[in-house]
Structure formats: structure tokens, C-alpha cells
């Protein structure tokens, strides 16, 4: 199994090009199921989660052609004929975002059988709201043998659905389903994450009628059919935030090409409070570490535009070297502190109290062998390794490959001493 070895200490300096967003690409790929015409996606990241979604779409009868180029990867997807409406356990188990095929399949084919994703490392992650929302649109849902069986033989009907809790993929599933429902659908308390907006813009490009994009109320006027289109995937704000924190931690200076501060408003504000300089130009953000030590800044994760839970572990790595202390509160996932014991093994001073973690800044982290437990936890260990003295060896790096394209290459280009070892 691959490992990553990092010898810490070098300040990062140079340019990093931010890839297309994983969490935008996955629902956009699933949207190909809504039409028999080709969907062209530009700026698709080359990640193992993208490969998993491509495998699932192929299993359903879609054709996926992924052309990887140095400049920008392009993917063409075409679900001319659906050969199956079943998303099997083996594929859904690998990646929970597989549940994104549920809404499009019911809308287009009138039925879907999707394996229940089950628990996962960062919490129970239920999908009850996806199902309640589809029921509101007239689907009949049954759970049997570990599968969700959804049926709407006469097609879906527009309705108003209010999310009691904000759900990103829940909003995306219902948004896609509602594009082909009869009449108007209103999704209230919808997720405002930029990836939801990106999907809505692509669906409108395919002929859907969605308004309220970027707000918490999405209004969808159903249409009879959707066409193909060409769509550019937005930049990955989580990747951008991660590298911004890497630059800050190592007291470096890195230009993030393709990054936009509007996609990370709270993260940007908190970085500045911690003493990090951010300068936005046309299509890039220059991040410079502080002249003195970083300052401890409290943080609470929240739905967009709040601080993204997918950057919580990285913020903890950053705060572990500050002057003073920081209280980090996780409000989205109930079990998302698995990086804490690993960071502590590297010398961080962190104590967990329920859903909050108190990080007391230390002068120095020390390299150690550590274990990656999930995607964002593993990258927090990379950040810690970049600034620690000595060698850090990160095990189970397949988690990283799910969400960070060419992570060692991008960091090495900025002077990091990092390599993948077998
Ligand atoms: C998406 C992101 C993930 C991110 C998360 C929160 C993708 C592919 N994944 O995950 O990286 O960490 O948003 O920003 O975009 N909930 C329910 N019932 C449901 C659905 C969700 O109770 O039916 C709860 C969850 O347990 C959680 C909260 O709602 O506490 C938010 O979950 P949700 O936004 O649905 O996360 P995902 O869409 O799975």
C-alpha cells in the first residue's frame, strides 16, 4: 500500500494550479443520466472518486470518455440508453456520493434501485432527506435487502419540500429530479454551497428552468426533456483552502491559480485574523505566511457561506502551531476528530470536549509515522508533516487520492520534500 514520506521544514514558494472541484464534478457527472444527449464537462479533476462515479455510470449504460490533458481535463458523458437502474453495493460502498444517481434515475427512467450507503468513518451520514424529498415529488420508496427501491412510473410531480437540515447532496438529488417533474418544485432551506450553484447552472444549460440559484430557495419549473451542453467545472474551494493553509503553516508564499476568495469567504476572513496575507488578482490568490507567529483563531464549521467542515482538519493542523489557543467546533459531522490523536502524536496539544476541540499552540511539531483515516484528515497530516522537524510517514494514502489531484507533484513544485513510497 502506498505511503507518503515528507521531510518538513521548507517554506512553500511558487504556484499551485487549483483543480476542478470534486464535489461539483460528481453531481455534474450524475446529471448525464437526465438526457440521452452528450454532456461535455471541462476541468474535471483526475481523482479516484471521479473514476468510481464513471464506473457506476458505465454500469447503468452510460458512456464515459475522459481525456486528460496538462491544461484541463475534459470528460464526455452520454447516457443514450439506460441498461440498468441499479447502483450496486460494491460501488456505493466505495463512495457515498453514488447516491447522486438516485434522483436522475427516478426522474428519467421512473425507477431506481440504489444500495443504502451505510455508515462511514466521519459519522452515520443518513440519506433520509433525499428519500423524503423524492416522496414529496410523488416517488414511492421502499427499503429492502439493503437497497432503496424508488418508483414513479407516471413520472414525478412538482411540490414544495423544506429541508429540516441543510443537505448538500440531498439538495442536488432533488434539484436534478425536479428538472423533469411535472409543474413547479420549490426546495426550501436548500444548500447554498457553490457546487450546488454550479450544478444548477449546468442543468439550465441543458434546458432546465431553475431560479433562485445561490439562495436557500430553489424554484424549478419542470420541463419534458433535457439536452446536452458543455460546462466548465468550478475550482475546488477545499483544495484552494488546503493549500492556502499549507502556505501559511510553512510561512511560505504561494500563488493559487484559479482560486477565488468568494468561494471561501469565512476561511479567508479567519486566515487574515490569524495573520495570513491574501491578495486576489484576476484569476489567482497570493497567500503569504505571517511575518511573526500565527495567531490562534476560534472556528465553527457551518454550511456555506460558513467555514466548510471539509477544511476543519486542516484548520486544526494550522492552529496547532499558533501563539495562544483556538477552539474548533464541528457542527456538521458527529465523528470528525479522528485526526486529533495523529496530530497529537506529532506533538500537537489538542483536547476534545464533545463536538469541540481546544488547540493550544506549540512551538514545533515533530515528524512521526501516522495513519490517514479519511480524506480531509489525511491532508491535515500532510500539512503537519510539511512543517514538522524530521520525517513524517503517512499510511493509507488512498484516502488522499480520492480528493487531491497530484498532491505530491503540486507541493514538490513549491519546494516541499515529499514523495510517495511503496
Ligand atoms: C457533502 C459533501 C461532503 C461535505 C458535506 C457537508 C459531496 C459529494 N460531499 O456531503 O464533502 O462534508 O456535504 O458540507 O458534496 N443529513 C441528514 N439526512 C440526510 C442528509 C444529511 O440528517 O438525508 C445530515 C448529515 O448527517 C449531516 C448534515 O445533514 O449531519 C449535512 O450532510 P450533507 O450536506 O447531506 O452531506 P453530504 O451531501 O453527504
Image (cartoon, rainbow, N blue to C red):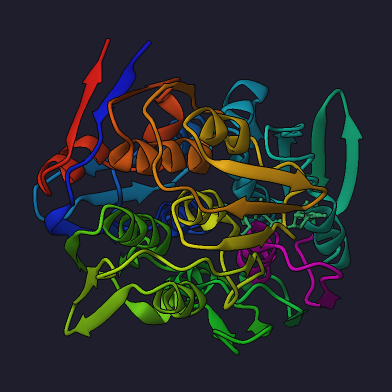
Residue at the spot x=61%, y=20% of the render?
A: 90
Q: Is residue 226 magenta?
A: no
Query: Does residue 62 appear in the picture of this structure?
Result: no
Is 157 magenta? The answer is yes
Res 17 → quadrant: bottom left
Q: Residue at x 83, y 53 (%)?
A: 131
Compared with 279, 402 (above or below) is above
Q: Horizontally, is 284 left or right of 310 in the view?
A: left
Residue 290 screen position, x and y as percent: 29, 69
Q: Nearer the viewer, residue 122 or 104?
A: 122
Which residue is depicted at the point 89% across and 51% down? 140
Q: Is 86 left or right of 243, judged from the image as shown?
A: right
- Nearest the camera: 7 or 371? 7
Report which quarter residue 254 is drawn in: bottom left
Q: Is residue 215 above or below residue 203?
A: below
List x then y, in percent, for residue 331: 75, 60
| Residue 261 in the image, given as x and y percentages of width and height | 36, 79
Q: Is residue 13 above or below residue 382?
A: below
Q: Is residue 231 visible?
A: yes
Vertical order, 236 against 198 (above or below): above
**Residue drawn at x 24%, y 70% as measured from the top left:** 291
Quadrant location of the C terminus in the rendered image: top left
Residues shaded magenta: 154-178
- Residue nearest the viewer, comparing 215 with 53: 215
Q: Which quadrant does the N terminus fall into? A: top left
- Residue 32 in percent (x, y) is at 45, 54
Number of marks present in the image shown: 0
- Which quadrant would residue 300 be assigned to in this image? bottom right
Pick whichever, 29 or 277, lies toward us.
277
Q: Quadrant of ligand 1?
A: bottom right
Amino acid at each position: 500500500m502506498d505511503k507518503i514520506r515528507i521531510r518538513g521544514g521548507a517554506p512553500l514558494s511558487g504556484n499551485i494550479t487549483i483543480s476542478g472541484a470534486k464535489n461539483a464534478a460528481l453531481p455534474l457527472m450524475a446529471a448525464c443520466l437526465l438526457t440521452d444527449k452528450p454532456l461535455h464537462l471541462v476541468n474535471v479533476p483526475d481523482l479516484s472518486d471521479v473514476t468510481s462515479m464513471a464506473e457506476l455510470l458505465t454500469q447503468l449504460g452510460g458512456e464515459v470518455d475522459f481525456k486528460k490533458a496538462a491544461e484541463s481535463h475534459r470528460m464526455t458523458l452520454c447516457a443514450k440508453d439506460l441498461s440498468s437502474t441499479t447502483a450496486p453495493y460494491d460501488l456505493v460502498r466505495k463512495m457515498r456520493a453514488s447516491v447522486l444517481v438516485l434522483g436522475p434515475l427516478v426522474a428519467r427512467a421512473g425507477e431506481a434501485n440504489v444500495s443504502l450507503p451505510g455508515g462511514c468513518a466521519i459519522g452515520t451520514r443518513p440519506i433520509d432527506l433525499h428519500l423524503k424529498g423524492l416522496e414529496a415529488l410523488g416517488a414511492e420508496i421502499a427499503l429492502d435487502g439493503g437497497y432503496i427501491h424508488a418508483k414513479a412510473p407516471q413520472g414525478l410531480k412538482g411540490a414544495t419540500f423544506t429541508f429540516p437540515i441543510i443537505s448538500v447532496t440531498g439538495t442536488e438529488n432533488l434539484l436534478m429530479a425536479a428538472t423533469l417533474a411535472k409543474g413547479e418544485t420549490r426546495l426550501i432551506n436548500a444548500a447554498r454551497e457553490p457546487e450546488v450553484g454550479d450544478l444548477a447552472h449546468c442543468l439550465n444549460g441543458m434546458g432546465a428552468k431553475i431560479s433562485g440559484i445561490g439562495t436557500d430557495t430553489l424554484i424549478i419549473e419542470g420541463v419534458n426533456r433535457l439536452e446536452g451542453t458543455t460546462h466548465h467545472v468550478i475550482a475546488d474551494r477545499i483544495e484552494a483552502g488546503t493549500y492556502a493553509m499549507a502556505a501559511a503553516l510553512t510561512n511560505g508564499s504561494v500563488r493559487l491559480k484559479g482560486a477565488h476568495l468568494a468561494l471561501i469567504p469565512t476561511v479567508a476572513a479567519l486566515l487574515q485574523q490569524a495573520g495570513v496575507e491574501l491578495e486576489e488578482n484576476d484569476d489567482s490568490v497570493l497567500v503569504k505566511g505571517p511575518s511573526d507567529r500565527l495567531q490562534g483563531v476560534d472556528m465553527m464549521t457551518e454550511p456555506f457561506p460558513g467555514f466548510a467542515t471539509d477544511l476543519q482538519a486542516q484548520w486544526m493542523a494550522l492552529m496547532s502551531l499558533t501563539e495562544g489557543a483556538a477552539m474548533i467546533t464541528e457542527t456538521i459531522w458527529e465523528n470528525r476528530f479522528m485526526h486529533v490523536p495523529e496530530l497529537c502524536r506529532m506533538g500537537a496539544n489538542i483536547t476534545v470536549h464533545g463536538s469541540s476541540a481546544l488547540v493550544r499552540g506549540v512551538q514545533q511539531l515533530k515528524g512521526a509515522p501516522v495513519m490517514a483515516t479519511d480524506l480531509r484528515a489525511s491532508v491535515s497530516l500532510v500539512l503537519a508533516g510539511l512543517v514538522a522537524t524530521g520525517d513524517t510517514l503517512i499510511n493509507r494514502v488512498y484516502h488522499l487520492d480520492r480528493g487531491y489531484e497530484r498532491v505530491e507533484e503540486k507541493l514538490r513544485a513549491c519546494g516541499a520534500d515529499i514523495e510517495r513510497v511503496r
